[in-house]
Amino acid sequence: MSTGNMNLTLKIWRQKNNKAKGNLVDYKISEISPDMSFLEMFDVLNEQLINKGEEPVVFDHDCREGICGACSMYINGRPHGPKEGITTCQLHMRSFKDGDTIVVEPWRAKAFPVIKDLTVDRTAFDRIIAAGGFISVNTGNAQDANALPIPKFQADLSFEAAACIGCGACVATCKNASAMLFTSAKISQLALLPQGQPERYRRVQSMVAQMDAEGFGNCTNTGACEAECPKGISLENIARMNRDFYSAKFVSEEEV
Amino acid sequence: MASFGNAFSSSIGKKLIMGITGLFLILFLIVHCFINSLIFLNDGGLTFNLGAHFMATNWLIRGSEVILMVGLLLHIVQGLRLTFQNQASRPVKYAVNDGNANSKWYSRSMGLLGTLLLIFLIVHLSNFWVVSRFTGIPTTDANGHEDLYAVMRETFQNVWIVILYVLAMASLAYHLLHGFASAFQTLGWNHKKYSPLIKGFGVWYSIIVALLFAAMPIAVHTGLIK
């Protein structure tokens, strides 16, 4: 598979487990094709490590086509590497130059503890979703698709928010390790649709409370999350979440 | 009984306090900058002293001053708390972090810029506010008003004070450059029709206010205005 001519120095974060102290380890890798994806380059490295009898580098990946949100590498100081609008698996080696040194670290946040090497525990996101990122409906026959009219503009906004794959790049790049972009996308996708209305103000309060409980930082509107999001989730979602939160706390008479 | 619950202790509530107090301070700066700019009339500070006299004697203004001080303290205390909390949210730092790739340095340095402003504020308040409100302004001008302008002239004879003030205004410019639009975003005022206006106005506001304030000690020190 290694048919290229790129020679690279990799500095990769190695950490045995959650308790161990990790450190950056240097690896030389050669004959890398510029057409390989970043993760394929890691596959080559891991094969070499296994052949040498060393422990391969543990990293998260699944679909390798930018839709699952599993891959999570902090490459040369940026989540998902130097390109915009893509995940690590969609990053190709042609984005680097022969002879480059590439530093690869895991997402860093108190709420995302390292499990091993480059893999972090992102179940904090799952718990935020479980706190209210759903709608309660009775099971049974699926409703007619057009039973509830939804304006296209509204549907599009909701869909743009729903594009969030929960990879955690927003948290990783935020100087405060804040999860507001993720949480606001998951709140907005439902707040924009009629099906999301019954639980709208309950949802925003419980999801924000869970986000705070997980130990994420507070948003300071630097906009780094929006710039690094592989799905282009907009800061408008954070503003919408803030509005809903104020409505819930200061206008609604319902207790949560 | 219904209550506000954790409205102000939650992450969004803490931001709300920063945003509201920040906008209040932005309003205050407009008044402060306008009255101080009266020195540029170059009338020996007579109009400026009149303005200062009004600010010191009008009961509505004096009442607002209390709110201003409370707002300022809230902004400072909450800002410092948030800065430390946010730093603690990432216990292990990145070995390599390319922050400039996705955000402006001043948007990431609000804590630092704010701390510089706090240091300036202590000097500034002891230079003028303490004098005008507590220890008393020693002389009066031709109209019989307390001659605050004379205090200004004397203070700005010291070149180090002038340098401190000018540097502080650079911090203020960058603090406002992020803070202005950020406050509106925190309040949830993100709108395709208005946000570009808010951002544009914020940039002009930050630059003009900081330049006017920075010009004051320079003009007084160099004798450009008498």
Image: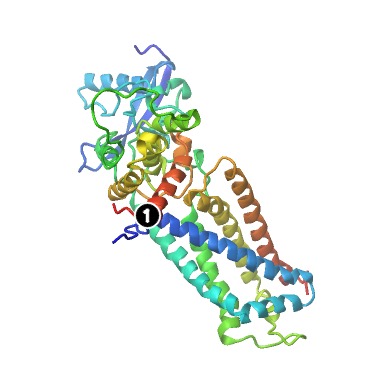
Q: Residue at x 48, y 41 (%)?
A: A236
Q: Nearer the viewer, residue B203 or B170?
A: B203
B22 is higher (above) or lower (below) than A12: below
Q: Please give the count of numbered marks on the rendered protein.
A: 1
The N terminus of chain A, quarter of image: top left
In this figure, which colouring scheme has been used for the structure? rainbow
Q: Residue at x 21, y 36 (%)?
A: A16
- The numbered mark 1 sits on a residue in which chain? A
In this figure, which residue is indicated by the disc labeled 1? A249
Q: Is residue B108 among what the camera can see?
A: no
A135 is higher (above) or lower (below) than A208: above
Q: Nearer the viewer, residue B45 or A255?
A: A255
Q: How far from the left and from the top, in percent, is residue B131?
A: 59, 82
Q: Is residue A10 among what the camera can see?
A: yes
Q: How far from the left and from the top, in percent, is residue A227?
A: 48, 36
Q: How far from the left and from the top, in percent, is residue B57?
A: 62, 82
Q: Residue at x 28, y 50 (%)?
A: A213
Q: Residues within 10 Å of mark 1 (few under 14, many from 20)?
A: many
- The quadrant holding residue A253 is bottom left
Q: Is residue B20 left or right of residue A114?
A: right
Name the element at disc 1: helix
Q: Residue at x 60, y 82 (%)?
A: B132
Q: Nearer the viewer, residue B6 or A58?
A: B6
At label 1, which amino acid type do we have? Lys
A172 is higher (above) or lower (below) than A253: above
Q: Is residue A121 left or right of residue A9?
A: left
Q: Nearer the viewer, residue A233 or B142?
A: A233
Which residue in the rendered view is the most extreme toward the front?
A: A147
Q: How far from the left and from the top, in percent, is residue A50?
A: 22, 21
Q: Is residue A83 left or right of residue B38?
A: left
